[in-house]
Amino acid sequence: MDVGTLCLGVLSFGDTSGYGIRKAVEDWFRHFGQASLGAIYPALAKLTAGGAIEVIGAPDAPLEKRVFRITPAGRQRLADAAAACDGSETVRSPFLAGMFFAHLLTMDDVHRLVDERIAGLRGEQRRLRGLPAEAMTEGQRFTIRYSQAVIAAAINFLEHEGRAIVTAIERENLSSNQ
Amino acid sequence: MDVGTLCLGVLSFGDTSGYGIRKAVEDWFRHFGQASLGAIYPALAKLTAGGAIEVIGAPDAPLEKRVFRITPAGRQRLADAAAACDGSETVRSPFLAGMFFAHLLTMDDVHRLVDERIAGLRGEQRRLRGLPAEAMTEGQRFTIRYSQAVIAAAINFLEHEGRAIVTAIERENLSSNQ
DNA sequence: GTTTACATGTAAGCTGTTACATGATTAC
DNA sequence: GTAATCATGTAACAGCTTACATGTAAAC
């Protein structure tokens, strides 16, 4: 899902600014998508030009807050983009990349990687738990529960079986360095 | 982890061609990284120019198989790249993006998304189970077990709690369309 | 024979990040 | 008063995908 569609997605729940979209993406979509400001502003310009969104209030002063509203055409476009989604998922994991080459790392680095991953997972877990489930559609709740299930499994692995494997990695590294 | 480092990673286990690297990435690294041929060949050229890898056999005929070998400098570079990894992970999920906007979809689309995701997860599960764990380092085994734990949790969620939520989505969509 | 897999490489183009440039408003 | 947050926008650059262009070798 590209940045433009993500913007439409945020705006489908209410009017906001470019900056507000970035925050909303971070708060609501982080478990399945990302968007930086440098991508959001050009995307908003394109969407406005294409009639999918409009500026309400139009300050026309530079550096002033511009609030966007989705148009019916924009809603249609969002629905089309949602229908065009497939069941794929890709993971980009510096964590696993590092662990894959654990035999080239120091033990400290291996422990740091695992600790950082656990911290990241816990943070994400906290964030998801803090979202107001009552105010959501069933679809939104679905994505949160799915992510929670996956995160819980990852934490569980790292805290139980993971520790044992890290010990094994240390043993292996030790013996191969001798 | 960029494509160049992925190439070094493959070559650290043995000499092969650009085409062979793509296959190896697909077979061994798919759970945490991706690389297409259009990215691999330029990366190999840069790595060769930088002295991190060398061509062995050098056919010099165009369109002939060129086998690459990692140099000691390349091994150092791989080790540095591994040590530079952090504990982060990002998910790009057209699946969850679609489900998030389930209220804009037909029931068929929702079922298709879930079915496709389950099929993808099962395929990945099969691939990981088929890898020869005996011939691996502890680090490699770690990444596989971690991914297996996460995948199993995702499948479990989709087959149990997931079904109920899909039914709830259908109920919600039905009532909001009336 | 013909399809599939193997094999290399280039180039256009898309998408996105980071850094830059600028300034207002709010909280402490 | 000063630091953090809010706020917009541009531009350089990175990185990758897809399509193009070409051809060989093995399997069926």
Image: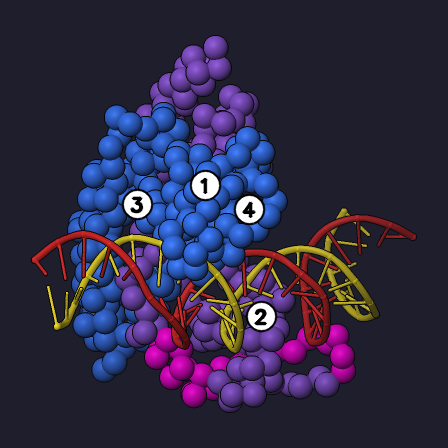
Chain colours: A purple, B blue, C yellow, D red
Q: Secondary structure at mark 4?
A: helix
> Which class describes the residues within 10 Å of circle 3: few (<14), some (14-19), or many (20+)?
some
Q: Provide the chain ID for the residue under circle 4.
A: B
Q: Which mark is residue B27?
A: 3
Q: Which residue is mark 1?
A: B56
Q: Name which residue type carries label 1.
A: Ile
Q: Are marks 2 and 1 on the same chain?
A: no
Residues shaded magenta: A61-81
Q: CA distance from mark 2 to mark 4?
A: 38 Å
Task: Report the Cα–Cα distance between label 2 and label 1.
Answer: 47 Å
- Disc nearer the start of the sequence (1/4): 4
For the residues bearing labels 2 and 1, Cβ distance under 8 angstroms: no
Q: Are marks 3 and 1 in contact (CB under 8 Å)?
A: no
Q: Which residue is more in the foreground, B89 or B59?
A: B59
Residue at 44 percent across and 34 percent down: it is B12
The answer to whether one can see residue A140 in this image is no
The mark lying in front, picked from 3 and 1, is 1
Tag 3 near tag 4, CB within 8 Å: no
Q: Which residue is mark 4?
A: B48
SS at circle 2: helix
Label 3 sits on a secondary structure element that is helix
Q: Position of residue A116 (x, y in %)?
A: 52, 35
In the foreground, B5 or A125: B5
**Residue occupying the point 57% across, 77% down:** A44
Q: Residues within 10 Å of mark 4 (few under 14, many from 20)?
A: some
Q: Does residue B51 appear in this view? A: yes
- Nearer the viewer's eye, disc 2 or disc 3? 3
Does the magenta segment cover residue A66?
yes
Q: Amino acid at mark 3?
A: Asp
CB contact under 8 Å: marks 1 and 4? no
Is tag 3's residue or tag 4's residue first in the polypeptide sequence?
Answer: 3
Residue drawn at (53%, 34%), measured in percent from left and top? B71
